[in-house]
Structures are given as structure tokens and as C-alpha cells.
Image (tube, rainbow, N blue to C red):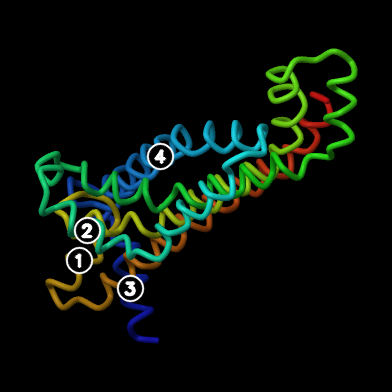
Amino acid sequence: MNTLTEAWDWLTDPAHWSGADGIGHRLLQHLVLTAVCLVVSCLIALPVAVVLGHLGKGGALAVNISNVGRAIPTFAVLVLLLLTPVGQWGEGPTVVALVLFAVPPLLTNAYVGMREVDRGVVEVAYGMGMTGQQVMFHVELPLSLPMILTGVRIAAVQLVATATIAALAGGGGLGRIITAGFNLADTSQVVAGAVLVAAFALVVEGVFALTGRLAPAWARRTR
């Protein structure tokens, strides 16, 4: 209980919320890093998954290949990247490692969502004279949106939790609070940093859960 009390005191100290090393600045860095990695991951994974899901070809292979990344620790990928020329790109190694970590859930959920669309609905759409592209964008994609958003939510929450490794490569984010606590042997600061990361992940989870609840109504209106 003493550690939790000290962590609470550390969090509520106004001096720890301001400045370049303050919670506010580190939280903003964490948010930007997470958002950038999520956007890049979506741009890579979602178009591939949507097209393969529409065609029904090659998706299983792509999903299995992307899932191999789950078996490789993100920290190990980051260390290896730091030893390559990519390590000279500032936040580049961290972004690459986190993107590789976020692609599997995005790709898997989007592909499964496209393939689980009722084939009868798809056949009716073709029977009405719609082209393959129209079917993909106006029928399959809206109906698979809840599953796609689930993948985005999973990836976002995982990125929030894993982005703390940026501190190990000299980057910013909430991980710097935790590593600074270790360096100072300050357990209360370590616990406070962990609480901040957990709270941030819960907030992100809540935002995407709310978005997911609104998605089915949007899909029905589109259909």
C-alpha cells in the first residue's frame, strides 16, 4: 500500500506534469507515436486484406505470414533494427518494430470480416448489375466494418502498451517515465508510469469500443 500511495503522490505532484520530462509532454509523445504507427499499419494491412478478402484468394497465406510476426518479440526486432542502417533514422527503428507488431491483427480481422459477409447478399449485388469494385466498396466493406474496427482496436491497444519500448531506443513517450524510475531506483515512479500506460490503454479501448457500437448502424444505413 505504501508503494501505491507514493505512486499516487508522484502522479498528483504538479511538478511532474510540466516541462520536457513531464507527464503531459511524455503523454503527447506516446499518443503521437501510437497514432503514427497505427496509421502506417492500417495503410499497409487494410488495403491488402480488403482486396484479398474480396477476391477470396491468397488471404490465408498472407494472414499466416503476418502472424509469424507475433512469435517474434518486438523488443528483439527493435534491437536488431538498431544494429542496421535503420538505426540512424531516429524513431525509425521503433516505428518499424511497432508497425510489424500491429499488422497481424489488422490483416487478420479485416480479411475474416470480408470473407464472413453473407455470400447471398454478394450474389444479389452482382445480380443487380454491380461491378466487383462496387460490391467491394458498397456491400462487403460496410458489412465487414465492425470486424475491421475490432482489428484496429486490438492493434491500437497493443501499440499503446508496447510503445513504451521507444524509451529503450532513446525515444520519448511514457516509457521514459518508467525507465527513469528504474535508473533512479524510484519504485513509486515506475509504478506511476505503469499506471499511466494502463490508463491510456483503457481510454483507447473505450474510444474504440464506442466507435464499434456505432459502426453497425452506419453499415445498415450504407447497405
Disc 2 residue type (three-letter):
Arg
Residue that carries the numbered disc 3 in the rendered image: 191
Badge 1 local density, few (<14 within 10 Å), some, or many (20+)?
some
> Which of the two labelled residues, at mark 1 and mark 3, occupies the earlier sequence position?
1
The amino acid type found where label 3 is placed reads Val
Placement of the N terminus among the 4 image quadrants: bottom left
Q: Position of residue 10 (x, y in %)?
A: 29, 67
Amino acid type, mark 4: Ala
Q: Marks 4 and 1: CB-CB under 8 Å?
A: no
Which residue is denoted by mark 2 in the rendering? 176
Mark 4 and mark 1: Cα distance apart in space:
22 Å
Question: Which mark, residue 22?
Answer: none
Where disc 2 sits, the SS reads helix
Q: Disc 2, disc 1: CB below 8 Å?
A: yes
Which residue bears the numbered disc 4? 35
Could you classify mark 2 by the number of other residues whose Cα lies within 10 Å: few (under 14), some (14-19), or many (20 or more)? many
Q: Which residue is mark 1?
A: 179
Q: Regarding mark 1 in the picture, which secondary structure is present there?
A: helix
Q: Is residue 85 above or below residue 160?
A: above
Q: Residues within 10 Å of mark 4 (few under 14, many from 20)?
A: some
Q: Nearer the viewer, mark 4 or mark 1?
A: 4
Given residues 48 and 206, the one toward you in this image is 48
